[in-house]
Image (cartoon, rainbow, N blue to C red):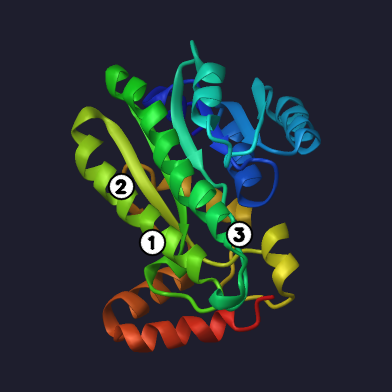
């Protein structure tokens, strides 16, 4: 297993939004499978600590790129940082999640959703995928959410942005798979990450750990455009996607998000 990703895609993987939570779990799992890492996030201390851990536990090399993915020229900065690397995997995990009634959320927070959740994956994929196409191998995972399968009250802008990522990844899968590029969207359920735990103290049924979700997502690369890690999460996706009306699906997800603060 430790060499399979390197053999299929290349020696390096980039994780955007890597400092903690799901992104850090992706980095650890990639390192466990023998990948060198480019770690991207705003918090230098967290990135450096993670890089030290990856080297100590797995013997891999890491490069830290400290930046805000909302910056206008972030994609150019990352492109320069990976120049010359055999970059084979892109994971875009970063997200802005303003919680509350839409009509009460500040405009700056909504703009941040567009910059980080929509513009970020769009431009980073555009910056890094052409080189993978030239190599004829590579993979990209855009991290979405079960909340992106329908409107989610109290996280309206977030759920809309995650729907964008679902459609973008599915379209890129259709465009690039004949060129040897595996593009997938990870529709993850709620996980006990620092961000989630900051908004609630409740746990959802069938909740996976970030480590487990990352491992299952990487195992599913190349098997299709949409990955839903976890049996309960897949049942939920089937329920809201096929069995319920849109009205019922929105009401159901609203029951799960009404406690967020």
Q: Is residue 144 left or right of residue 243?
A: right
Whichever of callouts 1 and 3 sits on the residue coming sooner in the sequence is 3
Whichever of callouts 1 and 2 sits on the residue coming sooner in the sequence is 1
Residue 25 % position (x, y): 63, 46
Give residue 39's quadrant in the image: top right
User: Label 2: how many residues lie within 10 Å, few (<14), some (14-19) or many (20+)?
Assistant: few
Q: Nearer the viewer, mark 1 or mark 3?
A: 3
Whichever of callouts 3 and 2 sits on the residue coming sooner in the sequence is 3
Q: Nearer the viewer, mark 3 or mark 2?
A: 3
Q: In percent of the image, x 55 and y 31: which residue is there?
A: 74
Give residue 146's quadrant in the image: bottom left
In the rendered view, tell whether residue 113 sits above or below residue 190: above
Q: Residue furthest top?
A: 84
Residue 146 seen in render: no
Q: Nearer the viewer, residue 219 or 152?
A: 152
In the rendered view, tell whether residue 39 sits above or below residue 193: above
Q: Which residue in the protein does label 2 denote?
A: 223
CB atoms at circles 1 and 2 under 8 Å apart? no
Q: Is residue 257 left or right of residue 59?
A: left
Q: Mark 2: which secondary structure?
A: loop
Q: Which residue in the protein does label 3 denote?
A: 109
Quarter containing the C terminus: bottom right
Q: In percent of the image, x 49 and y 71: which residue is there?
A: 156
CB atoms at circles 3 and 2 under 8 Å apart? no
Q: In percent of the image, x 61 and y 43: which residue is there?
A: 17
Q: Which mark is residue 163?
A: 1
* Real-space CA distance between mark 3 and mark 2, rounded to the nearest whole angstrom: 35 Å
Q: Is residue 260 left or right of residue 222?
A: right
* Real-space CA distance between mark 1 and mark 2, rounded to the nearest whole angstrom: 20 Å
Residue 236 % position (x, y): 42, 76
Q: Nearer the viewer, residue 136 or 3?
A: 136
């Amino acid at each position: 297993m430790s060499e399979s990703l390197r053999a299929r895609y290349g020696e390096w993987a980039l994780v955007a939004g890597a400092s903690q939570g799901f992104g850090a779990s992706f980095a650890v799992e990639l390192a466990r499978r023998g990948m060198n890492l480019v770690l991207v996030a705003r918090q230098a201390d967290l990135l450096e600590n993670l890089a030290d851990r990856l080297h100590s536990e797995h013997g891999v090399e890491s490069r830290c790129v400290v930046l805000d993915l909302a910056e206008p020229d972030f994609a150019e900065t990352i492109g320069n940082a990976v120049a010359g690397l055999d970059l084979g995997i892109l994971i875009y995990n970063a997200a802005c999640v303003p919680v509350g009634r839409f009509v009460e959320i500040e405009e700056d927070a909504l703009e941040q959703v567009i910059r980080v959740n929509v513009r970020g994956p769009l431009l980073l994929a555009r910056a890094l995928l052409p080189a993978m196409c030239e190599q004829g191998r590579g993979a990209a995972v855009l991290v979405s959410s079960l909340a992106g399968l329908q409107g989610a009250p109290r996280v309206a802008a977030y759920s809309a942005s995650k729907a964008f990522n679902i459609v973008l990844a599915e379209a890129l899968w259709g465009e690039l798979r004949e060129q040897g590029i595996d593009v997938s969207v990870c529709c993850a359920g709620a996980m006990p990450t620092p961000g989630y735990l900051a908004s609630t103290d409740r746990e959802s049924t069938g909740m996976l750990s970030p480590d487990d979700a990352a491992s299952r997502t990487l195992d599913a690369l190349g098997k299709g455009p949409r990955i839903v890690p976890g049996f309960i999460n897949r049942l939920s996706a089937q329920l809201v996607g096929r069995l319920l009306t849109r009205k019922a699906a929105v009401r159901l997800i609203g029951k799960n998000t009404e406690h967020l603060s």
